Structures are given as C-alpha cells and as structure tokens.
Amino acid sequence: MFEKSTYINRRKALKSKGLKGIGIFLGNNESPMNYRDNTYHYRQDSSFLYFFGLNFPGLVGIVDFDSGDDYIFGDDVDIEDIIWMGTQVPLTENAAKAGVHNTAPFTKVFDIVTKATASGRKVHFLPPYRGENKILLEKLLGTSSLVVSSQASLELIKAVISIREIKEVQEVEEIKRACKTGLQMHVTAMRMAQVGTWEQKIAGTIEGVALAGGGMTSFPIILSQNGETLHNHDHSQTLKEGKLMLCDAGAESLLHYASDFTRTTPVGGEFTQKQREIYEIVLAANNKATLLTKPGVTYLSVHLAAAEVIAAGLKELGLMKGDVKEAVAAGAHALFLPHGLGHMLGLDVHDMEDLGQINVGYDNEVQPVDQFGTAYLRLGKRLKPGFVVTNEPGCYFIPALIDKWYAEGINKDFINFDKVNEYRDFGGIRLEDDILVTDTGSEIIGERVPIDPDEVEEIVQKG
Amino acid sequence: MFEKSTYINRRKALKSKGLKGIGIFLGNNESPMNYRDNTYHYRQDSSFLYFFGLNFPGLVGIVDFDSGDDYIFGDDVDIEDIIWMGTQVPLTENAAKAGVHNTAPFTKVFDIVTKATASGRKVHFLPPYRGENKILLEKLLGTSSLVVSSQASLELIKAVISIREIKEVQEVEEIKRACKTGLQMHVTAMRMAQVGTWEQKIAGTIEGVALAGGGMTSFPIILSQNGETLHNHDHSQTLKEGKLMLCDAGAESLLHYASDFTRTTPVGGEFTQKQREIYEIVLAANNKATLLTKPGVTYLSVHLAAAEVIAAGLKELGLMKGDVKEAVAAGAHALFLPHGLGHMLGLDVHDMEDLGQINVGYDNEVQPVDQFGTAYLRLGKRLKPGFVVTNEPGCYFIPALIDKWYAEGINKDFINFDKVNEYRDFGGIRLEDDILVTDTGSEIIGERVPIDPDEVEEIVQKG
Ligand SMILES: [Mn+2]
Ligand SMILES: [Mn+2]
C-alpha cells in the first residue's frame, strides 16, 4: 500500500466535502466460484482500497463526518487459523498502516450503525454490486437486499468521484506499472497471431502474463478475429489467414491500478490493402484524440473530433458521403464507430463505474447525448489535469447493424451501402491507449504499445 | 456439452429417487469483480451443469418430480444485444441440447414456483453459496436471503450426491483432459523452481497454462516455499536455496471437470539428505494409499494406513517413537499430517462441497472422526467403483503447532520434540495424485505427474 499519509489525506479530503452523518465503506469478501470456499482471485472494493488501503477480506471502514473519526472493523485470526494460514498481522497494526486507530471486531460495526440510525444521523453508503454486500447491508440497515441499492447516497457518490477522479502522481506511477505489464501482454499476443492458432490459447497465455506480473487482468480479455462483435469474450475460433485479431486487454498493478489497451493485428503478419487503409484511419483518429485531449476541453468534443476523422477517412474510401460534419452531427459515423471514445481509468478499468457512469462521466454542464453511438460515450465532461482516460476509437463492419440501417434507410444520405457491403467480412479495428491529462495537454502513459502498422507486422512475422 | 441423452438419463436417475414436489436448480450468473459489469471468468453451478448442461448465465432449471417434466427458464437476447454480442442461439435450441423442451422467459419461473408453493407441494433446492442466488431464492420463495440457506433440501442433496459421486466413463475422460493440463502446469512450475524466482511469477505462469488449455484453474493455486502453511495463497517470496517449493494446482477441462495435483520440488534442483528422506516417506504413503484404494474399503482406513506409513518413516528417522499403530490411534501423526488423505474430485475440485462435506464424504456407517487431523478428512466412507478421489498425504513441520504440542505435552509419548525441533525450518511436503476407483482396485488417471525424486531433480536442473 501507499504511505499512511496518503489514506489520511484522502479521508481528510472526503471529510471536507460537507457531508453529515457517517459513511460506510464495505470491503469485499472472497467471491465463491463453485462453492463457498473455492474462490476467485480476491479483489478488494476500489473505494475501500482508496480510502482505507487494506487489501484483504472481512473489513468495513467507517468515516464519521461529524466527529472526523475513522474506524475499521474486522476480526483477527485465532490460533487454529495461524496453523493453516501462517502468522498474521493483527488488525490494529494493519489499520495503523492506513492511519486508522479505531479498530474493533467485526460485529461491533452493527453497534455503530445502529446507534447512528437510532439517533437520526444520516448513514451514507456507496451502491453495492456484489450479492454478499447487499445482504450485509440488509443486516446492517434492516433494508431488504432486494431494494437496498436504491438507498445509496448520491452525496457520498459525488464526493468520492470528485476526489478519485484526480489521480495523484503515485497513482499515475502505479498505472504506468500496469501499462508495462499490458505492453508485455499485447506484444505476446501479436507474436502468437499466427494462422491456425486457437484464440483461447493466446488469451490464456496473455492472462498468464498479467498474473505472472503480480496482478490480475483488469477486465475479462477480449480477443477475437471477429472484432466487430464488440463484447466478444468467445475465444473458441482458430485464427484464419486474412483476418484481423482484435485484442482488448490490460493488467492490474500490485496495488490494483488498471491498464487497458487495444491493438488489432493481421493474422500471420501482413495487412491487406483494405485492412491497412482502415487501420490508418483509426490510427489517425487515435492520434488526433491524444492531440486534442487537454484540460478545459470536454471529452465529448474530443470524441466527436475523432468521429470526424473516421468519417472523413471513410468518405475518402467511398464508404461514406456528404458533408463530414453533418454526417457526424447526424450520427452516421456510428454505423462504424458505435461506441464512445473512452472512459476514465484508475483503480477500475472503467473507473468508478460502480458509482454510476452518469455521475462519473457527466455533470450539470455536459449531459449524455441521446443518439446511437455517442450515447455509449462513458466520459463526456470537461477534462481536468490528473484525469487518466482511455483513447479508443474503432471502425467495425457489423453485418446485423449494416442490414438494419440499410433496411430502415438510416443515415442513407451519408452512407454508401453498396460499398459498405464489400466490407461485410472485414471484422473490426480498435486502437486504444491510456493517456494522462497534464497541466497543458496530455501524454501517453509509459512506453506506447506498438501501433505503427509496419512495426506490428514485423512483430508477428518474427513470431 | 455431452450428448443430450446424458442429461436426460441423469435427470431420469434423479426422478427415480422417490422425491415429491419440484426441484429448483439455480444456474450461476456472472460474478462481479469490482463493479457489476466487470466480471470474473464465468463458472456455471456444477449441479446445474450436471443435470442441464448449459454453460451460460441467466438460467434456472426445474424438475417436476410428480409429473416428470423438466423446464429451463431464461431470456433470449434482443437485437441490440446481437449487435454487441454477435448472433446468439435461441434458448429453445440450447435447451433441446440437454433434452429439455419446456422453456420460458425467466420471469415465468416465479409462476411455477409460486403455484407449487400455493398448492402445498414441496419445493426442493440445493444450498446457495453465492449472494446473488440467495437473493434470487428470496425473490422466488419469499424467505429472507439471511436465512434461506437453512431451508435447503437434504433429500435433494442426498439424491444428487448418490448420482454425481459415481463418475460416468465420459466424465473420467474429461477429468483425464484436466489432468493433462495439470501435468503441463506442474512440469512448468518444476522448470521454473530456480533460486531467486518470484513465487507469483511461477503461479501466474502456470495459471496461464491452465487458461491457455481452455479451462481455468480448478482452485486458487497454492505455491510456496512455506509449504507448511497449508492454506498458503501468498506468493510474494522469491525462492531460496535449500527450500522446497510446494505447488498444489489443477486445471478445469473445457466441460469444467477438475484435476488437482500437488508436487514438492527442491529449489534449484537438488534435494538435501533430510528433504529426500522425508520425501521418500510421503511418496511411500502415497503409493501405499493407491494400492489400498479399492471398492468396499473405507477411505478412512486408507487414510489411517497412509498415516501409519508416515509415522513408521518418522520413527525410523527418530522423529517419532513408540508403537506406530498406537501413535496413529492417538493421532500423534497429525503433528506432521494435520489434514485428510483426500477428497472426491469431479465437476468440483472438492466435489460437491457445496452440498455439505458430511453428506458427500460420510454416511450412517462411517461417521466423521473427532480427532485433530483425521477430523479434516473430507472423505471417509466406503469406496465404490466410479469414485474419483485424490490421494494427498503430506508431512509438514509447522512451528506454531510444534510449540503448542510441546507446551501442552500433547502425544509426548510418541514424539521426539528435540529431534523435531531440528526440522523447524524444513517446510512441508505433499504429493497428490488423482485416482479412479475401478471394479477391482484403483488407477492413477492419465500420465502420472513426475514424482520420482531423481526425475523431479532432473526437470528442475534442465530448467
Ligand atoms: Mn477501454
Ligand atoms: Mn486436493
């Protein structure tokens, strides 16, 4: 974990936000796979990690906004456990590492919450996303696990976001470490992108690279020669000559900060003419977006600028037509780029998504756009120094979507459907970097994952 | 999945067990990591997989014991989803693969359960182990998620165990596939067992081997030079000269059958004299156990026989004393072997542990033994052809346990504590194989993971 002053300062910042009452931060417990004691890799809740730092199960943190006191509740292990688990550090000592000196056995958390509720104080909590924590909230608050989520505190959500969204220098360093492992994952995948290789073999191997680096993957790996299927976690195919392998994957650092990269690699190591043309368009959109990303601009405007690069490129290839700005305003680019340019990155790959995307990515000034494509943009609001965001334009040929738009005549003034149909089996390309908003502009975090098409070809060919 | 006749026959067997009313089989949903949509590898519930075969989220299966009808409830994806997820097979078609022809949208499961409850029919369900399914049961039955587990049906539990415990030939073939990947994992770990290597690098790499094989690990990998810490998921050390690396790891096959092996490897590739002596004792216990494992004997008796081999060997080395059979009867071996010989293996690494270890491993004839060490034996009952079990004797030097026994004089007539103290920094050795109970005896499943100490040394030395 970081120095204890880190956690003290973060909680201090939280206490300065004007909340009254107490804030409950539920840690995560072990997550059962196929029976209670056969568990997935342990993953602490990110807000708990952020404010209390301790990376093990069985904990609840409480911030008393009125008195300023902090508490951590949890149980020490007994002698029997020590035999099985080895010597364990007592909770008091662990909590001290986070600058928390009020600790008590887990059951005592019921007392403090009950007392607060009974005396009419406001009890704030963040939206639970695991069944186990919904049930724990039912026990704590007496509100059924079926509805308890609806009582999460918007005030606490907004306070937490306002702090977590600005990354400390040491957090950026951690993200850089995650990026380093992410780079190794992607280069490994490129080397393995040979004709006849089973997708799962590659996906599994690069997940192993993440795990061998000390963290886990920051999200389930997307790796497919059907890159046009955006949420594709199917890795059952073998790579075929002439296809593109789209790989969207990242790692967590030891302190659970995320990286998130996408690269698209020609199977066997040679782009076709068609592939290279589209690749260059997506790359130009990516570079343009990094160039435009700086404090004070909205990410919505950067998204739309990247969309314009895509639309202009596709017009040049004869796939789109008409005025580029009008086409983007009408959402015509979304046939090819039906998702947003990017999202915040931090302790979560979609940082703070559990707190609500609308709370993280938008505000009173910049509201979500209700248009197919841009509606999926996770981050629209004005950028600040210290934001870490992903930059991930793409261009896809999704037969079901093409057919739907053609049948319904959607944006027919901007799309040459005849030409588009020649690309039906193209697949998709996405190129994603992780960038830091600096005081004056933005920069790619760490060494850039190979993206130059010649360099990518060479890596595959060398194998 | 297997042929549809497999699932029809398994449900037929279940229906022949004399239950009345309906049986609910909850499938598993996605399991959230750090927010709802960032999920772990999907793992279907094993009993659902066994009786209904379908390996994706959002399903409930119902068996009507009175009418003999089977149902699967779940939702088809809509057009929006197809754009993101690609073309999906309709539920009717998927359910037909399991021989189930009654399908309906998910919400209809509430009707069938409510109707059954209202007409006074018994509603059987298995113990839920994930929070999400406890909450779903609350919705279905109106019983609070806090207490619903206590109403699981012992009748259904026992019926399911009586069927799942006897492995079909095709199941043994799947376990063999999992064993093949497990072998690759262990040989990879042995090759990496060099001085100065980070434990996590090895653990992560061999998890990658499992994933690249198409499955996941069947349980969280145990890999440590502190093998005496039995539940050691800490991989933070670098391997040191003169230590033993204990690795307990296995894979799942594509159909989610498990393997589970333990090997203990000298860091750098050379056993010390002391290490080799203890290794040979554990190996002898392992070989003896396989030899004794056959239909009609209790696994408790095999466990005790293995414990005698350990005790006899330790007596020869001067670590134990007195009569070996008396020592084992007194539980003195448990200072060195404080766990059980093994457990059932199948769709779960501790097969059916969610149904209760006492229901799986014991019966009216053979009851759990209330003595430190043997109390942890997960399988005691009489063996039948078709059982698949693990054979995992070990020998550990656990300083905290040694000190406790010495201080309290536990089994002092059988233990030479002075001599034992010379082994305080020894660590631990465990050697685990997966074996099938045949009609006449037992056999190791698949190619045996290298276990001969000379062969293990050679693998490490070759690197
Ligand atoms: Mn991303
Ligand atoms: Mn085992």
Image (cartoon, coloured by chain):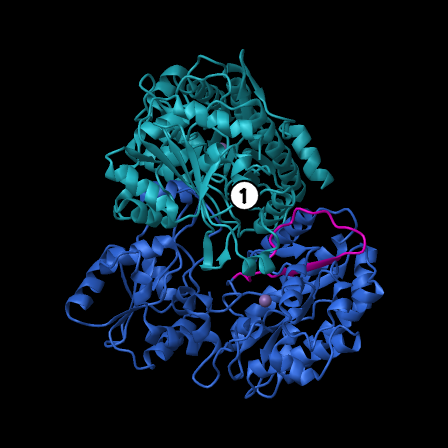
Chain colours: A blue, B cyan
Q: Residue at x 68, y 38 (%)?
A: B460
The answer to which quarter of the image holds residue B409 is: top left
Confirm whether residue B271 shows in the render: no
Q: Position of residue A100 (x, y in %)?
A: 33, 67
The answer to which quarter of the image holds residue A377 is: bottom right
State yes or no: residue A238 in magenta. yes
State yes or no: residue B84 in magenta. no
Closest to the observer, B124 or B452 = B124
Q: Position of residue B225 (x, y in %)?
A: 54, 43
Which residue lies under the disc numbered 1?
B223
Q: Residue at x 80, y 56 (%)?
A: A242
Q: Position of residue B457 (x, y in %)?
A: 67, 34
Q: Position of residue B250 (x, y in %)?
A: 56, 37
- Left or right: A336, with A40 as reference point: right
Q: Quadrant of the C terminus of chain B?
A: top right
Q: What segment is highlighted magenta in the picture? A: A232-254
Closest to the observer, A326 or A160 = A326
Q: Main secondary structure of the magenta part?
A: loop
Closest to the observer, B437 or B163 = B163
Compared with residue B419, is residue B144 higher up or lower down, i.e. above or below?
Answer: below
Q: Quadrant of the N terminus of chain B?
A: top right
- Left or right: B108, with A323 as reference point: left
Indicate the amino acid at tag 1.
Answer: Leu
Q: Residue at x 60, y 53 (%)?
A: A233
